Image (cartoon, rainbow, N blue to C red):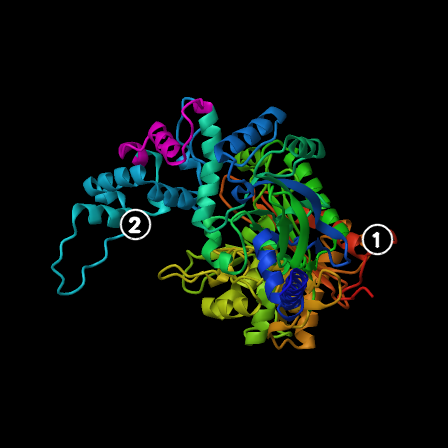
């Protein structure tokens, strides 16, 4: 073969090689880009993308007309995420830089390590809640020097563990070694057992704990104690989150734009600014109804919440509607995949699951009406407090007849939800207990406001008829026992009275006789049917009240029949009982939920239950007789107060004695309009001296509800969807 042929052959072979190489390349390219595109794309994404949670905004709360009561304000949080650190980054140094910046700019950062931040270092364990103690105890058990010291102490003092030791298995003769017994005792240690005294007695002093943590977390020796303590606080937060398999840590909340700029310009390793939100209160009213949110605590059963998608740093409803309707208000968090380059810089963001905001919760209350009721109650209490002898509390409830919807629920004194955290120490120390919901939680002796009930119960049980009259001589004496008697407020007596006249004249003699006839079991049977002595069903905390009872060997029914004796009912219970009465016997569950709707108003998810819990068969004649008795009081004794009322009404006053040396509580119930009752009202004011003192407040409430206000406009009507 000559030289030219050899050269051609080489060129041919080279060409064939190039063709084969190109073909193979094209085949591989086709396989990657077309045949197995999804597989390789997923592999590529996994290598450069990490998944993070996208917080869903919490649902808003509105009144029955769509007016916002609680909404959200967008904020920015500073999160420290160790996953963002490169292999060359020193986590301790990164943390120190970050907290020193916070310290310099006056930004508070979250640090729940229960050791004071400044020398002399002392424990703050006894100030922790059980959830914080749970996490701290888990951390101590994971820290070898501390776990060993605690275990050795518990061997010497097993009584420090409140959880009993399990019984040995039957037939077992194995005796645990000291090491295993110490571990068993340590495992049985619960948050309630963890105290500062226990730690100090076990030799786990703050200084020793700091030393153990410095060694465990490789805190450099050249760090001062102050610097080390700042870093350890953040490292502790990261550690307890790892115990719950949740690495990200919200270092500071609600940071401002200048601070964000400093973070961006300073290239702070591990720092990430995330979009968040805080609750914004659109009103200073309804604090006891709305409640508030807070961080998850041990009382919230975090392990169960975690299964529902909650993370350790999530906020959850703690009181009021925020707690009651948590399942509606909590949105569904989304997932976002964040792509980064080799230097850790974010190059793209991709949503794998979009967050879904929480539902709109529409309450039954009317904001303007609620505000007015609170104002009227406060004015009355302020006026009564002017005597200088008392600092009174009060509660009022307004319930819609026939549905159980709560239109207003007011407690005085009240507080401002927008500042309650800052004011907590002052509020908690206030002897007037402004954070206590008197309208639903406090029980008051009903006094004579119970007389319409007793009259109806007597008619329904057949112990009295519409035509029967009882002669009031001024003093009712228990049959065959002259030492037991009851005076009518009119000592000369009212003479002959029927049911209607007995209510109008508030005759104790009449109702003592009726109570004697019914006996305690008969009274209690009907009290329960009218919803007294049991919870109304409202979604926020309430008292069940207290039904009257007979002491051993005594019959207290004659006194219980007109509201005396050991019985207590909340204003909400009293309003609901009056609503049940004037509706003709429809006992409905009191409730605050009008409707829960999708965040975009596209769907009604749930509505409040307006169906009767039970129905009492009340004839029109019986109802008319009782209502006329309450109307007679409005047109008689209470006429000076009701002459300016814009609607016809029926009412009953009540005065209940607390102690011989204190003023009586005042209680008042009413309904309106008389011919077609729409609302029932109950008011209780502590040591008001007489129920009649509350009549002007009740008239103001009725006028506020039945006087049209053309300035009040709603976003949506009741249970109506936006197009």
Which residue lies under the disc numbered 1? 712
List x then y, in percent, for residue 113.
44, 36
**Residue at x 18%, y 59% (from the top left corner):** 168
Quadrant position of residue 624: bottom right
Whichever of labels 2 and 1 marks the residue nearer the N terminus, that label is 2
List x then y, in percent, for residue 525.
50, 70
Quadrant position of residue 484: bottom left
| Mark 1 nearby-residue class (10 Å; few <14, some 14–19, many ≥20) | few
Q: Which residues are magenta?
A: 198-226
**Is 218 part of what is drawn in magenta?**
yes
In the displayed structure image, the side of residue 91 where residue 586 appears, left or right:
right
Comparing 293 with 134, the one in front is 134
**Helix, strand, or loop for circle 2?**
helix
User: Which mark is drawn over residue 370?
Assistant: none
**Residue at x 74%, y 59% (from the top left corner):** 64
The answer, for residue 515, to whether it is visible in the render is: yes
Comparing 422 with 158, the one in front is 158
Which residue lies under the disc numbered 2? 187
Mark 2 vs 1: CB contact within 8 A: no
**Helix, strand, or loop for circle 1?**
loop
Tell which residue pokes out farthest to the front in this image.
2
- Quadrant in which the N terminus is drawn: bottom right
Q: Is residue 124 above or below residue 38?
A: above
């Amino acid at each position: 073969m000559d030289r030219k042929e050899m050269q051609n052959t080489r060129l041919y072979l080279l060409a064939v090689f190039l063709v084969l190489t190109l073909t193979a390349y094209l085949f591989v390219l086709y396989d990657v880009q077309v045949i197995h595109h999804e597989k390789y794309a997923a592999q590529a994404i996994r290598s450069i993308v990490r998944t993070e949670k996208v917080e869903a905004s919490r649902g808003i709360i509105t009144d029955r007309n769509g007016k916002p009561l609680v909404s959200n304000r967008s904020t920015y949080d500073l999160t420290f995420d160790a996953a963002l650190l490169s292999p060359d980054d020193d986590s301790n140094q990164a943390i120190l830089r970050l907290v020193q910046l916070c310290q310099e700019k006056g930004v508070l950062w979250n640090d729940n390590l229960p050791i004071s931040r400044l020398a002399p270092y002392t424990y703050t364990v006894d100030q922790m809640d059980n959830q914080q103690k749970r996490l701290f105890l888990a951390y101590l058990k994971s820290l070898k020097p501390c776990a060993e010291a605690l275990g050795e102490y518990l061997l010497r003092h097993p009584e420090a563990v409140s959880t009993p030791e399990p019984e040995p298995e039957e037939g077992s003769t194995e005796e645990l070694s000291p090491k295993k017994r110490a571990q068993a005792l340590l495992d049985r240690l619960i948050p309630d057992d963890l105290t500062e005294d226990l730690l100090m007695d076990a030799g786990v002093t703050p200084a020793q704990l700091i030393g153990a943590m410095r060694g465990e977390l490789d805190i450099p020796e050249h760090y001062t104690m102050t610097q080390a303590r700042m870093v350890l606080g953040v490292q502790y937060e990261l550690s307890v989150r790892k115990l719950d398999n949740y690495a990200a840590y919200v270092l500071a909340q609600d940071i401002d734009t200048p601070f964000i700029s400093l973070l961006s310009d300073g290239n702070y390793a591990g720092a990430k600014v995330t979009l968040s939100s805080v609750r914004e209160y659109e009103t200073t009213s309804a604090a006891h109804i709305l409640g508030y949110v807070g961080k998850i605590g041990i009382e919230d059963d975090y392990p169960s919440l975690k299964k529902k998608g909650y993370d350790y740093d999530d906020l959850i409803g703690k009181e009021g509607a925020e707690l009651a309707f948590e399942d509606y208000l909590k949105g569904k968090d989304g997932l976002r995949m964040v792509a980064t380059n080799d230097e850790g810089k974010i190059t793209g963001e991709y949503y794998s699951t979009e967050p879904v905001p929480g539902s709109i919760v529409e309450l039954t209350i009317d904001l303007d009406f609620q505000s007015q009721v609170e104002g009227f109650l406060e004015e009355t209490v302020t006026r009564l407090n002017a005597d200088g002898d008392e600092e009174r509390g009060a509660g009022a409830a307004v319930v819609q007849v026939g549905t159980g919807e709560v239109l207003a629920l007011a407690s005085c004194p009240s507080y401002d939800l927008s500042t309650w955290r800052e004011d907590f120490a002052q509020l908690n120390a206030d002897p007037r207990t402004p954070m206590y919901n008197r309208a639903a939680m406090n029980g008051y002796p009903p006094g004579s406001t119970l007389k319409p009930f007793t009259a109806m119960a007597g008619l329904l049980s057949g112990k009295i008829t519409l035509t029967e009259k009882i002669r009031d001589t001024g003093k009712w004496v228990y049959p065959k026992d002259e030492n037991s008697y009851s005076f009518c407020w009119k000592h000369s007596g009212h003479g002959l009275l029927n049911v209607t006249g007995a209510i109008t004249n508030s005759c104790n003699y009449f109702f003592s006789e009726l109570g004697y006839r019914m006996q305690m079991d008969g009274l209690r049977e009907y009290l329960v049917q009218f919803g007294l002595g049991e919870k109304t069903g409202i979604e926020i905390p309430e008292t069940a009240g207290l039904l009257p009872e007979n002491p051993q060997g005594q019959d207290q029914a004659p006194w219980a029949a007109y509201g005396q004796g050991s019985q207590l009912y909340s204003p909400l219970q009293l309003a609901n009982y009056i609503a049940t009465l004037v509706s003709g016997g429809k006992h409905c569950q009191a409730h605050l939920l009008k409707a829960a709707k999708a965040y975009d108003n596209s769907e009604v998810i749930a509505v409040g239950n307006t169906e009767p819990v039970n129905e009492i068969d009340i004839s029109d004649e019986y109802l008319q007789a009782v209502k006329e008795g309450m109307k007679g009081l409005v047109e008689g004794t209470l006429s000076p107060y009701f002459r300016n009322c814009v609607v016809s009404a029926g009412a009953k006053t009540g005065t209940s004695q607390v102690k011989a040396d204190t003023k009586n509580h005042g209680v008042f119930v009413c309904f309106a309009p008389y011919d077609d009752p729409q609302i029932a009202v109950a008011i209780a004011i502590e040591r008001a001296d007489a129920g009649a003192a509350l009549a002007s407040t009740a008239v103001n409430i009725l006028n506020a509800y039945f006087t049209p206000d053309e300035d009040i406009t709603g976003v949506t009507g009741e249970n109506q969807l936006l197009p």
